[in-house]
Image (cartoon, rainbow, N blue to C red):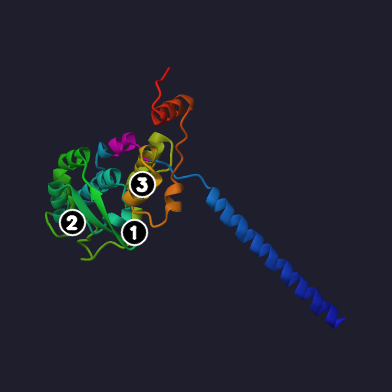
Amino acid sequence: MEFKHETLLKKLEKIEQALLIVKKKNFFVRKKENPLRESASFFIFDYLMNLEKPKKIQHRVWARNKVCITLLRHFGLRASDIREITMFKLKNGIKTGTMQIAQPKTKKQRVIVFTDSAISDLQKIEQELKIAFGYQLDRPLAYSIVTGKLIPCRKWVNQLNLFIKLANKKFAGIFTSHSFRINYVRKLLKILPIQQVQSIVGHKDISTTKRYDRFRPDASKMKEIITKALNEKIE
């Protein structure tokens, strides 16, 4: 009787392990099938940039938020990538046209390019830049005047997301700091081969870049693309 009881317990343990494996597999399948997060368009950026500062928020924090989304929009960076940017780096980037960024996630360096529109938008927020960097050339953007250290990465992202969240109700979506990167990558994928986009945005694996590829042209756009590729006249 005791032997049968032990056998039954072993069978139940095997069933429980099998169910756990199935549960894990289903979780990963669902995770892969989750829709891409919301993309932040120019309209969202423009809306956030024109918001008036609430009385309870410090001038430096408000200015820093505007600097952050300007960098995210024009360079397709992650929020973690901009923590250590300094005013000196930005000024030099505007002057030379490029800037090297350390990417904590991939532990690699990435060169970003300053377009005319990026330079124009940065010049528009010259006062916010001074306030955000505390009028210091070598002080990182995420520097805390309270602790004298960099704001921890998770806290940094959460603070930035609280600002971006102000666009959720207006545009009926859920936007985060990563929404600007999504918009940046998706726009590049419409006009460039995926390998080039991977290199530009600094993805370690091309499969990551593929997850952003949601561009599906309609019939007229497909005709235009195919005609252009085959050098035929559009009827």
Label 1 Cα crowd, 10 Å radius (few <14 / some 14-19 / many 20+): few
CA gap between label 2 and label 1 equals 19 Å
Residue located at (44% from left, 37% from top)? 215
Residue 60 sits inside the magenta stretch: no
Label 2 or label 3, whichever comes before in sequence order: 2
Horizontal arrangement in the rendering, residue 232 relative to residue 6 (left or right) = left
- Please name which of the two marks, 2 or 1, marks the residue nearer to the observer: 2
Magenta range: 40-48
Q: Point out which mark residue 54 bears.
A: none
Q: Disc 1 designates what residue?
A: 155
Secondary structure mainly formed by the magenta segment: helix
Q: Disc 2 designates what residue?
A: 86
Image quadrant where one finds the C terminus: top left
CB within 8 Å, label 2 to label 1: no
Residue located at (14% from left, 44% from top)? 126
Q: Nearer the viewer, residue 87 or 220?
A: 220
Q: Residue 220, position in %: x, y?
A: 45, 24
CA gap between label 2 and label 3 equals 26 Å
Q: Residue 67, position in %: x, y?
A: 23, 47
Residue located at (30% from left, 35% from top)? 47
Q: Quadrant of residue 110?
A: bottom left
Q: Residue 113, position in %: x, y?
A: 23, 47
CA gap between label 1 and label 3 equals 29 Å
Residue 46 sits inside the magenta stretch: yes
Label 1 or label 3, whichever comes before in sequence order: 1
